[in-house]
Image (cartoon, rainbow, N blue to C red):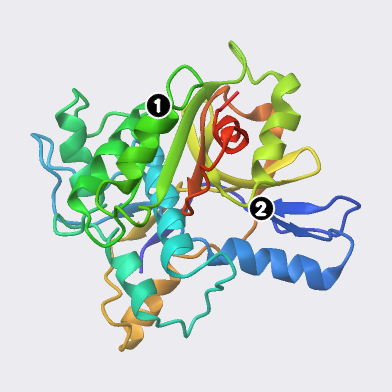
Amino acid sequence: AFLQQETNYTCFDITGHPIWILGQQYDGTQESELVSAKADVQSRVWLTYRCNFSPLSGSCQYTSDKGWGCMLRCGQMLLAEAMSRRHLGRSWRWGKESREADYLQLVSMFEDNIEAPFSLHVMTAMGCTVGKDVGEWYGPNTVAHLIKKLPEFDMWNKFVVCVVNNNTLFVEETRNSCKESHPNGWDPLLVIVPQRLGINAFNIFYQEYLQSMFRIPQCLGVLGGTPSHALFLIGYIGDEVIYLDPHTTQDSVCIGKKMRAEEFAADETYHCNNTPHMPIAHLDPSLAVTMMRSLLKWKDNTDRRAMLIN
């Protein structure tokens, strides 16, 4: 299968720093903990540039998103993480033999065809409705608002997506949306908070704030990256941020029911074998923090205040 890596990846080394990945802490001084941390990273669904898929809509008829689709792929990784939490749980770990029905369905929703509800084909077609041409680069704020529209076509997950504007979440309005289809229950709430942590460059003053997000169990990751180079941020070690990088070009594949050798090989392309990390100070200041709440805990003013994004 075609695979072109555009980034040199690194793996975790023993350090004196703890490793935090999406609310889970690992001891950076223990080899066994480094192995567990790598397995955690590898279990995230990794969405990258793809090629040789059916043409996207638009005059250019793109059959690859190399060079422009990186933030869209990061948006897909965010959605995949939200689905994994909902259907598989935070403690789930991927392996080459993983064939759970929920897992296979999850991955199929991101395959590169118009039938997949969260495919690049659907996302770019929806982007055209808000003035984004196919082949145009997206920023985190635009992708956040695109993600807000996508669950309208998804009956399996039934997410309610809230994009927070002006750093304030309207509690009652959001609560009612989550209860709309389940009067006695709760639709999972995906909260996306676009922010700018600096003017022309990342302000190191916000480093502790960003690190604190990765220590929250409800954290799903951060849409961010370096200038014009989108990354999906999932944790940190010391002063470095851990991320998944979509800048690897792979053939478009289908994992089906994961019965044949080629389907097993296809599944491996959705998981990164490395644990890349880089200085937090190198980040672009424009990013979007994301969280998910799946339980109804809005009982008093303390809980309500906790839902405000300060």
Q: Furthest residue to the left?
A: 59
Residue located beneath label 2 in the image:
23
- 275 on left or right of 130: right
Q: Return the mark for residue 141.
A: 1
Q: Position of residue 20 (x, y in %)?
A: 72, 52
Q: Is residue 69 visible?
A: no
Which amino acid, mark 2? Gly
For the C terminus, the image quarter is: top right
User: What type is the residue that disc 1 sits on?
Assistant: Asn
Q: Which of 210/5 is in front? A: 210
**Among the 4 quarters of the image, the one containing residue 161:** top left
Mark 2 vs mark 1, CA separation in Å: 23 Å
293 with respect to 131 (left or right): right
Query: Which residue is more in the foreground, 16 or 59?
Result: 16
Of labels 2 and 1, earlier in sequence is 2
Image: 309 above or below 256? above
On the picture, is 220 further left or further right than 258?
A: right
Front residue of 177 and 235 = 177
Q: Residue at x 51, y 42 (%)?
A: 298
Quadrant that contains the N terminus: bottom left
At mark 1, the secondary structure is helix
Residue at the spot 40% in from the left edge and 59% down from the top edge: 83
